[in-house]
């Protein structure tokens, strides 16, 4: 399949999928924000020294011949206050303070410590003396009070600058807004780093995140969308026969059944392989429920567990213990096909299922005996559903696809990389069993109501490149009395 046209639009971000990932990974954002926020607070605490301020307030009065203050006097006082502000900041005042301060200070210290402000629309001037020593701040402020008159009185003979609020020695350090600001900036910066990291994870983890991406990235039609279902710990599997799975779950499989039946009528197919690109995508649950819903519609159905590495159908269907061999036994000649096929009255389906893994599954499935088994059951059943090991992980699915008429691919939301899904599709198509569509599983983005989460059946951690042997499950459950096939 050619995917070039699917990628012509370049990289795109699905906003809703990205936001869901952010909510899922929000702890990353919080962690980075807290770490950098705490670091910013600590560094600012070390870098920013405590400061102490002593304040002086002056008021300007103009001298008038009239006993009562006139409007012109008030206006003049406001204007003169602006001029006095600059005089109080002048070199003459600073030098006078340096010469008369009780605590020795330099010109630069006084100049940096002194801040003068004329209060708007008033005749008040406010001076602040700020240093890292409360006694030094107070000493400078006292020197200003004691010496400012000699300097400013000569400039305006008709105005009088008086102290209305004398300085006191600061008892506590000034509250610093700089430390709060630095902490806040570090906190926000940390949160942004967390978001960028999540974005990188989003880009690197190129999986299917919603139904729209299936057609865009892998070019498959959707046979059905299964919403996430919460599986109880004590349950074996999620089957349509269990009323607890909900209406939407059951109806979705009926819709999938309809599409499979239509394909069978249109193309003459009756052997369908169900697989996935990676482990834990729910293919065994899908194949089991598809077989059951086909049987509910009056079809004779044989469900074959061809995953000889990690067989799981017996687990999902809760089959009772039996000494009868499964598919591996038939292939090796240890059991007959007739004795291996068993009828499950509870589900009205026929099953071939193993309870234990085989040591050489690829070799067993590649034998002529396996081809003979499929040929023998084709005419005996309306539908044959084959559950296999994940495609693109091992060759088992490729072998089975050459014996099947069509393939249904299970794609679990945000699970398998797109590259692996494409690899699986190409591998299956090259062996003759065209992928007729996919079941989008375990989704929280579909149009159906969320019903919870699927359990994971049968697969452990066997990386993308390897698939180990000898799992030795020892489930402890087996099979019941079988009935011969029809």
Image (spheres, rainbow, N blue to C red):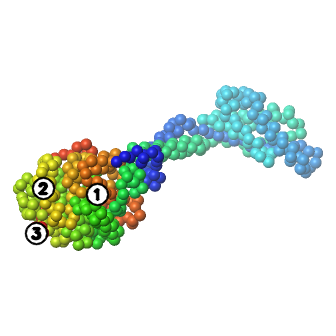
Nearer the observer: mark 2 or 1; the answer is 2
**Residue at 27% in and 56% down:** 407
Question: Does residue 256 appear anywhere in the picture?
Answer: no
Nearer the observer: mark 2 or 3; the answer is 2
Q: Circle 1 is placed at which residue position? A: 408
Q: Badge 2: how crowded within 10 Å, few (<14), some, or many (20+)?
A: few
View extreme (right): residue? 65
Q: Circle 3 is placed at which residue position? A: 483
Q: Percent from the top left, x then y, of residue 259?
A: 32, 64
Q: Quadrant of residue 154?
A: top right
Q: Is residue 180 above or below residue 336?
A: above
Q: Is residue 470 above or below residue 449?
A: above
**Residue at 67% in and 32% down:** 112
Task: Work out how far the residue at label 3 is from the one at label 1, CA to CA, in angstroms.
Answer: 28 Å
Q: Percent from the top left, x then y, of residue 410?
A: 30, 56
Q: Nearer the viewer, residue 410 or 479?
A: 410
**Along the horizontal axis of the image, is 197 left or right of 61?**
left
**Along the horizontal axis of the image, is 358 left or right of 131?**
left
Which comes sooner in the sequence, label 2 or label 1? 2
The reply to whether callout 2 and callout 3 are in contact (CB within 8 Å) is: no
The circle drawn on residue 372 is 2
Which comes sooner in the sequence, label 2 or label 3? 2
The reply to whether callout 3 and callout 1 are in contact (CB within 8 Å) is: no
Q: Percent from the top left, x then y, of residue 130?
A: 65, 37
Q: Secondary structure at mark 2?
A: helix
**Along the horizontal axis of the image, is 301 left or right of 42?**
left
Which comes sooner in the sequence, label 3 or label 1? 1
Q: Secondary structure at mark 3?
A: loop
């Amino acid at each position: 399949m050619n995917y070039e046209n699917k990628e012509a639009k370049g990289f795109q971000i699905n906003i809703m999928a990205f936001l869901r990932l952010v909510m899922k990974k929000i702890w990353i954002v919080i962690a980075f924000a807290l770490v950098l926020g705490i670091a910013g607070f600590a560094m600012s605490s070390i870098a920013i020294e405590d400061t102490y301020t002593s304040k002086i307030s002056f008021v300007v009065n103009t001298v008038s011949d009239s006993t009562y203050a006139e409007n012109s006097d008030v206006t003049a006082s406001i204007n003169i206050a602006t001029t006095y502000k600059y005089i109080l900041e002048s070199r003459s005042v600073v030098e006078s303070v340096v010469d008369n301060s009780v605590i020795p200070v330099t010109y630069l210290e006084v100049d940096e410590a002194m801040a003068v402000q004329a209060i708007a629309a008033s005749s008040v001037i406010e001076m602040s003396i700020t240093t890292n020593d409360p006694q030094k701040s107070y000493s400078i402020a006292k020197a200003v009070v004691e010496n400012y008159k000699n300097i400013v009185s000569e400039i305006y003979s008709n105005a009088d600058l008086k102290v209305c609020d004398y300085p006191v020695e600061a008892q506590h350090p000034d509250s610093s807004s700089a430390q709060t600001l630095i902490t806040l900036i570090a906190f926000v910066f940390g949160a942004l780093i967390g978001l960028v990291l999540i974005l990188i994870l989003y880009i690197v983890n190129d999986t299917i995140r919603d139904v729209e991406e299936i057609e865009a990235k892998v070019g498959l039609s959707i046979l059905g969308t299964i919403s996430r279902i919460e599986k109880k710990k004590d349950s074996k599997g999620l089957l349509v026969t269990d009323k607890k799975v909900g209406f939407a779950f059951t109806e979705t499989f009926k819709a999938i059944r309809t599409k499979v039946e239509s394909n069978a009528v249109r193309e003459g197919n009756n052997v369908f392989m169900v697989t996935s690109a990676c482990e834990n995508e729910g293919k065994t649950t899908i194949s089991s429920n598809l077989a059951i819903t086909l049987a509910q519609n009056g079809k004779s159905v044989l469900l074959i567990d061809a995953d000889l590495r990690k067989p799981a159908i017996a687990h999902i269907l809760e089959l009772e213990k039996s000494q009868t061999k499964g598919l591996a036994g038939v292939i090796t000649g240890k059991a007959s096909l007739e004795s291996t096929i068993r009828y499950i009255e509870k589900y009205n389906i026929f099953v071939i299922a193993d309870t234990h893994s085989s040591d050489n599954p690829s070799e067993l499935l590649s034998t002529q005996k396996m081809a003979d088994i499929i040929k023998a059951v084709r005419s005996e059943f309306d539908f044959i559903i084959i559950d296999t090991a994940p495609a693109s992980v091992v060759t088992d699915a490729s072998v089975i696809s050459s014996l099947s008429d069509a393939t249904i691919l299970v794609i679990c939301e945000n699970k398998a990389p797109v590259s692996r899904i494409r690899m699986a599709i190409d591998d299956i198509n090259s062996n003759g069993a065209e992928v007729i569509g996919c079941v989008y599983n375990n989704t929280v983005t579909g149009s159906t109501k969320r019903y919870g989460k699927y359990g994971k059946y049968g697969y452990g951690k066997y990386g993308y490149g390897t698939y180990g042997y000898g799992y030795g499950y020892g489930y402890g459950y087996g099979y019941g009395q079988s009935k011969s096939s029809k």
